Image: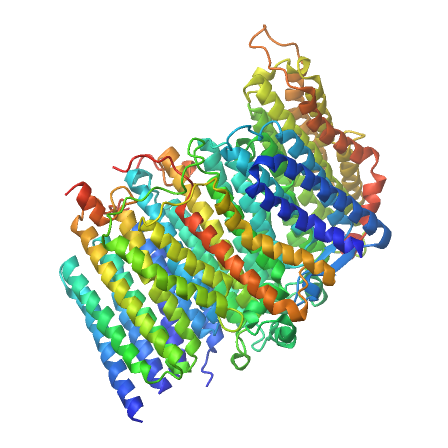
Amino acid sequence: MMTWASGWLIYGLTGATLIGLGLFGFASHTNLLRRILAFNVVGSGIFLVFGATGFRVPELGADAVPQALIITGIVVALSATALAVSLITRHASLSGSATLPDDDREDR
Amino acid sequence: MITDALTIVLTGTGLIFFVAGTVGLLRFPDTHSRLHALTKADNLGLGLVIAGLMVQVPSPLDAGKLVLVWALAILAAGTTAQLVARSALKKGQSAPDDEGMQ
Amino acid sequence: MSVWFTSLAVLLLITLAGALIRVWRGPAPADRMMAAQLAGTGGVAVILLLAAATKNWLMLDVALVLALLAAFAAVGFVKAASRNGVGDPEADEEAAP
Amino acid sequence: MIDSLFDLVLCALIIFVAFAAVSGRDLFTAIVFFIVYGLMVAIAWLRLEAIDVALAEAAIGAGLTGVLLLGAYGRFKNIDAARMGSWVPLPVLIVIALAATGLSAAVGVVLIALDPNGLGLIPAVNANIAQSGVFNPVTAVLLNFRAYDTLLESIVLVVALVGVWTLADNSAWGQRVGKTQSVRANGVLQSFGRTLPPIGLMIGIYFVWAGSSQPGGAFQGGTILAAVGLLSAMAGLFPPPRVNDARLRLSVIAGPILFLAVAIAGTAWGGMFVLPADLAYGLILAIEIVLALSIAITLMLLVLGPPEMTETPQ
Amino acid sequence: MPSSLALTAIIGAPLLGFFMTIVWSRAAAVVASLTSMVVLVAAVFLAVSVSAHGAVLTSLGGWDAPLGIELAADGLSVMFMIVSGAIVLVVGAYAQHEFVHPGTETRSGFAFWPLMLVLLAALNGIFVSRDFFNLYVCFELLTLSAVAMVTLNGKTESITAALRYLLFALLGSILYLLGAVLLYAQFGSLDMGVIGQSVSSSGAEILAAGLMTAGLALKTALFPFHGWLPPAHSGAPPPASAMLSSLVPKASYFITIRLWFDVMPELAGNPLTLALGGLGGAAILYGSLQAIVQTRLKMVVAYSTVAQLGYLFIVFPLAGGDSAAQPWSAGAWTGGMLHALSHALAKSAMFLCAGLFIISARTDDLEALRGIAQTMPMTAFAFTLAAISLLGLPPSGGFIAKYLMLTSAFASGGWIWAFLILAGGLLAALYLYRPVRIMLSLPKQPGQPFKPISRWWQVAPLVLALGAVFLGIGSNEPYALLQIGRPVAAETGL
């Protein structure tokens, strides 16, 4: 009972929207934690696109290779996020700011 | 047939509790009364849905999983309610204040 | 039956959306955390209904993981809200009643 | 029809939560929305019949990443509001928004134009799963067909850990990892920290064991074991290990080094990463178990952070 | 089949070393040096077998593409592996003095050695991999270890520089990942060979290739995205910045070359080649002008990296052009590769020299190095040799590279590119002449005496600088090796 949009395409287009939202968030705010959060949103958007394209024929089930690579991608994204968060915490304790120096708005 | 009817009744009431919990969360004036609404939805809402599904589940292992999910949800709801309530009690000094409203 | 389970799941999702309004509006951080907690439990319920709708009972494992880690975010929040970032509300009460 | 309605409502919810997480009024709201976002995406993975990924997303997205961000947020208390960052000026904001929408639209158009019944590598996996030694196709890809990626990924975790440890003060080297917790003995948190871990341990081991035939495996099981370990550490049940503790380092590299040893041993059967069909199941299970333990410990150490000077908790 | 054993060694050995240096940090320096020696020997052995029997291809785990991951070593990858193996070996020897702390284990003494070995493993992984997702995991490994190295000396500005580097690098790898995902959606495979055969310029491929190129340009610090490189490379400790500046950006450049020359030559139309060439030219001018005005030696050397990376992207318009077969594009392609190699050797030598100067003069300020050549003649000579190679004066490797690129520019009528190459050489002369003049001039009034540095320590940069020069003198070997497995597109033009 494929309605006008088959299941996988809805999730694919959602993934595409998430990529845009995440990149917008990554570049639009100077707070470093928000940028890392936005980076994770882009990552999960890309994985949704990847997973959706692996499920184009529901009768055959989901393609195992995208699933495996997405799990690998999630763990790599987690390691990068963990290093980034520790760097941000260290940067904040050393220079008392939650942003990169060139984004600092002293006048606010 | 009876089991399906039972499931429909139980899961339906479960949903109603969830709705009640959410409405409570939105309408009640202060943090503590909202906390009360939240625990209702957690325990009863989920509990009823799980009870409704117990009869649908093919193997005892899955039934065991359902019970375990319910037990964990209760444990988590209780602990969260306690911790969040105490943390909210000292509201103001310790809770990290919202950053400037740009 | 599966139509019943799926429509119930849709209604539950809409209830979740309601809870998220509290996350958006909730004045105190505790309110937001509680709403997230309710959303978590609602999510577990949605997963259970999906498992019933598709008769794919392996999905129960995901509900199990979410139920197990439900309190994890709350513990993280309480730690962040404690005075020195590493305590808990009761330790803070002891230290400064 | 009802299924498409469910998909539409879920996707609308995911996009709303992501928008709120990205443009939330303040940092704490953004983090809470991100935790809910991880949960919603886990449900989306169930609709795409990717249960292994749903497990990983639930354990890592809704679990560990949320606690990581909350922990960092807790450390921002002594930064005054002026230096917590702000939105970029409006004209720049508009340009970014246009660029982001353009990229999303481009990806969307490409997806719509894709061949609607592209099979990807489904036939290839189904044809070779018999020789892979396991029944779960995802575990077969992760630990046999593309084992090299999985080995490198487990090494990325260890490199991130070395990177996190490099951020310690020189004087703090040799101290215990992370900050020492000050938790009331037998309070709510500590008793919760005592009751949950046994159940969590059981569930974690179940997932590692089940990985060969049904959704689960080293990464999902390892993440759950990490969460359990973190909870007991945060509940102050045991002091975190010292950074130069030899046993700790051995346990961190045990999984990846066993994986590498099996991979190199494969050259005896024809080439790197070759798993002889009859031994494949045993080797994969051994790798999964030791890898799960290493991943659990590494993830726990990553979230605990670098060793810090033990100042007396106020 | 010994060559597949060599392939196993160039990846397995550094990873094994990485694990051992973490657990056995007391003997980390020795383990690291031994491992890098083994890797270099394996790379040379591989080079010999490649030059004898042509490119080596193995499917890991016995699973052929598209299901499994394939590794292939052709002339290009073998040359890059030999140069990076040599640089890591010499930097490891240099670092014995700086990161071996007797007594209780220290933070940087523990961290440097595993990071160095995993960097080498990631580089070799990138140079031989034929799978786009595997390349993604390899260069995440590379990025995390490079970022960790920048924070080694723990100073506040290095932590901030490392953070900015990580943000740029994460954005780059995310864009690359999206491109790889779209390729898989279109072709059902991530293997270069499988994709290369069925390229048809559909929307998905153009978007995927564009995203991957943008991501890789971000990680190669191509001109508009170079902001993170100078502070990161000058903030890192000298042995680390020697590896970072000479090898890490080359890895993502290497993937770009594979993408455009091996996999999708038909897609590389004029808009792409001119854009990349234009940005490369801008990088040369901007990097050189910035280097001229810097007051700190390490910043001069770091900005010179930004400039020299610009040359590499001029290869695209030179080897491009949409008319029939262009005889000159082979020369341009080989010239670009030789430039990448000679720059790697010269730049690592320069950073090691800068490190020795800083230890001796206790400051990075150029003016304070006046007359340092008298106390450290060997290092000053090594610095000058490296400068000669960067300028592209004969007989250095840089000269051969620039000569090949210039002849291709003139043959293809691309006078803009010829002008840019020459202008780059001239500007390089400006910003490199100043430090050399200061070093060789008479020391000002007997200020603080320079600390003498042991002879053995000064040999390290000299070896690398001589390597850069010998790459020019004995250049027919590398030239011949580079032709093995050279893509057809490098022959007939993009």
Residue A62 drawn at (x, y percent): 53, 74
> Is E41 located above or below residue C1 in the figure?
above
> Is E290 located above or below residue D131 in the figure?
above
Residue B64 vs residue E395, the one in the foreground: B64
Task: Please give the name of the residue rendered at 33% of the width and 54% of the height, measured from the top-left corner.
Answer: D30
Residue E469 drawn at (x, y percent): 77, 31
Residue E456 drawn at (x, y percent): 69, 23
**Relative to E476, B68 lies left or right:** left
Residue A57 drawn at (x, y percent): 54, 79
Task: Please give the name of the residue rendered at 53% of the width and 76% of the height, measured from the top-left corner.
Answer: A56
* Residue E493 appears in the picture as rendered: no
**Relative to E469, E255 lies left or right:** left
Residue at the top extreme of this rendering: E445
Residue B53 vs residue E355, the one in the foreground: B53
For the N terminus of chain B, the image quarter is: bottom left
- For the image, the number of numbered tags is 0
* Residue B6 appears in the picture as rendered: yes
Residue at the bottom extreme of this rendering: B1
> Is A108 located above or below residue D87 in the figure?
above
